[in-house]
Amino acid sequence: MPLDRLAGVLDRHVADLTTKGTAKGAEAVVVEVIPAEGNRGPRFRLAGSGDKQFVRMNSNSYLGLSLRPELVEAEEEGSRRFGVGPGAVRFISGTHQTHIDLEKRLAEFHRREAAMIFSSAYTTMVGVLAPLTTADGTILISDELNHNCIINAIHMSRPLDKAVYKHNDMDGLEKALQEARGRARRAIVITDGIFSMRGDHAPLDEVMKLAQEYDADFEENVIVVVDDSHAVGSFGVTGRGTEEYTNSALPDILVATLGKALGVNGGYVASSAEVIHFLRETSPTY
């Protein structure tokens, strides 16, 4: 079946993005990575640029771990032992001992009871927020500068209602909690740890104090969810992210990534044993 009429609509949409300056544009294609040598960091060759070498200034591999020989060797050893893929989703027959070991180490690192890994932090956020949201009793409260994954997770979750407070405005957060009590059984406060477009961080110590102050007003608690993907591994004295840097009480649910400071791929959530057990049974992206 031809898509001639749809194709025209799609082309006009992309042209409009280009005119507005919001189109992503053609992707730079890396064809070779030249390892670091001496005092010189790694260089990259791009398709269509011949032998010219580039320095990558927009990488999220904050610590350069993605090119560490130890990590490369560990991945190769894992592939030799288990193959290049599990052959099934986790809950059928795709869970390997390495998954369990990693989840245990992540939970211990973050001082939580349990953890659960996903294919990316983006799918983690969607997979965490949707099943925790009830259409008849949950109000989601979000910082206005939260990452796109949180925005889309809220859209997909279909809560009773949502509130967006001004960036890092604790008066705004408190007002949202006050307006939610009596209307919802459950309030979920969601914030980035470090905000990706600004580089500033949430005052998690204050967020947690407000959540604790209003918790008794909600039958099913005030739950704090933090996406700390830009902080874990590179922020805080021991790399434990924004909660460590602000010396806050531990947020109820921590979402983070293996694909930034830690240099590989994947995302994860760390929380109580009950929450992780629930998510293994209900998360749509697990």
Image: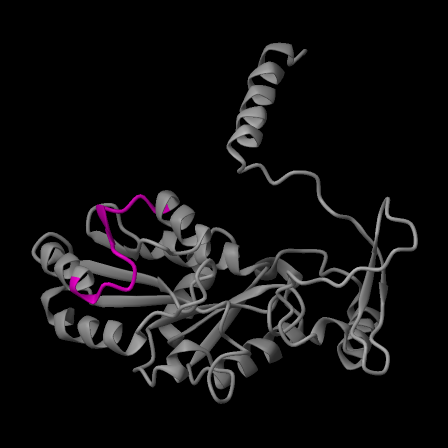
> Does the magenta portion include 160?
yes
Residue at 43% of width from left, 85% of height from top? 111
Query: What range of the chain is rendered magenta?
Result: 157-171
Q: Residue at x 35, y 66 (%)?
A: 225
* Quarter of image, res 233: bottom right
From the top left corner, tell me how far across and down residue 274 is, in percent. Answer: 36, 72
Q: Nearer the viewer, residue 231 or 270?
A: 231
Task: Please count the marks in the image.
Answer: 0
Q: Residue furthest right?
A: 51
Residue positioned 39% across, 44% down in the render:
156
Image: 120 above or below 6? below
Is the residue 240 above or below the residue 170 in the image?
A: below
Q: Position of residue 129 (x, y in %)?
A: 37, 56
Q: Is residue 168 above or below residue 250?
A: above
**Viewed as shown, does residue 50 lie left or right of 248?**
right
For residue 159, side relative to residue 46 (left or right) = left
**Relative depth, front residue between 12 and 19:** 19
Q: Residue at x 82, y 75 (%)?
A: 36
- Using the image as rendered, state which of residue 85 and residue 281 is in the foreground: 85
Outermost residue toward the bottom? 237
How does the figure colour the protein chain or chains?
A: one colour
Quadrant for the N terminus, please.
top right
Image coords of residue 245 (percent x, y): 40, 83
Residue 131 figure quarter: bottom left
Q: Seen in the image, is 199 located left or right of residue 265?
A: left
| Residue 170 left/right relative to 253 | left
Percent of width and height locating residue 270: 44, 73
Q: Does 234 lie within the magenta span? A: no
